[in-house]
């Protein structure tokens, strides 16, 4: 077996080179990111409980990833490849959330297109959020008919008698049949967005300077391991074949 180590080494090196070639052949991909800040406006609403904040974040996430928002984003972009679907567009997007900031990330084959996608998505998300919030103000507490968290105005003496939205988990003792179709439609059009939130554009996406790094080391390691295994198999098979040949000659 030790006499076969050059074969194993050679095949392992070839495997590593093949892995590097495969990594180099993958088309470059660029990622750009826009960010939006969303939080409770102290001039409009009382602070949310953790459960209410969690529910508000879920609704924001659903709205940002909805077909309505993504279609609006695509409409702002130049015509893409023929036959490009909404699902294909969605596959180039990623939404992250950290401490009240939403990061809308987009990937593309060029830096400019990646930035255009991220900014179009952020613009559409902002528009849809504000539109949903306008409907939420009209629907108010009747959101509880469709969602688990709703808001209603509350007079706060400490704020000089101001009306602030108080949002909490609640269920109204009202049947949908007792509410006008117009009010129910306002609640649906709100997408569950709460009226006491504010949204602002934290940062627009800029074309990235470099593509996202492919893990070339991982490709090379994988190719080397495959090469070593193949080299070992070649060495074992050649040794077995040689042994059988010697036995055959000896029996003659």
Image (tube, helix red, strand yellow):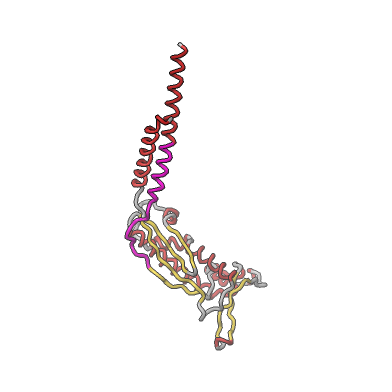
Farthest residue, direction front: 2
| Residue depicted at 36% across the width and 59% down the height | 114
The one nearer the camera, 89 or 26, is 26
Residue 237 quadrant: top left
Tell me the quarter of the image containing the C terminus: top left
Residue 46 quadrant: bottom right
Vertical placement of residue 251 versus 178, above or below: above
Q: Does the magenta stretch include residue 206?
A: yes
State which region is magenta: 204-228
x, y percent for residue 131: 47, 71
| Residue depicted at 34% across the width and 43% down the height | 21
Q: In this view, does 5 lie to the left or right of 149?
A: left
| Residue depicted at 37% across the width and 55% down the height | 212
Farthest residue, direction top: 252
Vertical placement of residue 243 versus 30, above or below: above
Farthest residue, direction bottom: 160
The one nearer the camera, 51 or 20, is 20
Vertical placement of residue 210 versus 231, above or below: below
Q: Is residue 27 magenta?
A: no
Tell me the quarter of the image containing the N terminus: top left
| Residue depicted at 45% across the width and 63% down the height | 69
x, y percent for residue 233: 44, 31
């Amino acid at each position: 077996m030790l006499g076969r180590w050059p074969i194993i080494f050679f095949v392992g090196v070839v495997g590593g080179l093949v892995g590097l070639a495969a990594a180099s052949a993958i088309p470059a991909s660029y990622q750009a990111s826009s960010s939006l800040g969303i939080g409770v406006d102290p001039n409009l609403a009382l602070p949310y409980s953790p459960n209410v904040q969690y529910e508000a974040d879920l609704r924001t996430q659903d709205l940002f990833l909805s077909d309505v928002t993504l279609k609006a984003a695509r409409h702002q972009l130049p015509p893409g490849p023929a036959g490009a679907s909404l699902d294909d567009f969605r596959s180039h997007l990623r939404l992250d959330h950290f401490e009240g900031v939403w990061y809308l990330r987009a990937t593309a084959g060029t830096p400019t297109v990646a930035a255009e996608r991220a900014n179009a998505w952020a613009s559409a998300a902002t528009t849809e959020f504000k539109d949903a919030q306008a409907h939420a103000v009209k629907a108010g507490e009747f959101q509880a008919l469709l969602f688990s968290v709703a808001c209603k105005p509350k007079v706060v003496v400490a704020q000089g008698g101001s009306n602030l939205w108080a949002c909490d988990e609640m269920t109204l003792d009202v049947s949908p049949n007792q509410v006008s179709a117009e009010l129910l439609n306002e609640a649906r059009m709100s997408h569950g967005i709460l009226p006491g939130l504010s949204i602002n554009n934290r940062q627009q996406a800029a074309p990235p300077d470099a593509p996202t790094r492919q893990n070339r080391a991982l490709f090379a390691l994988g190719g080397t391991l495959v090469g070593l295994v193949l080299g070992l198999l070649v060495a074992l098979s050649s040794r077995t074949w040689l042994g059988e040949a010697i036995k055959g000659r000896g029996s003659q």
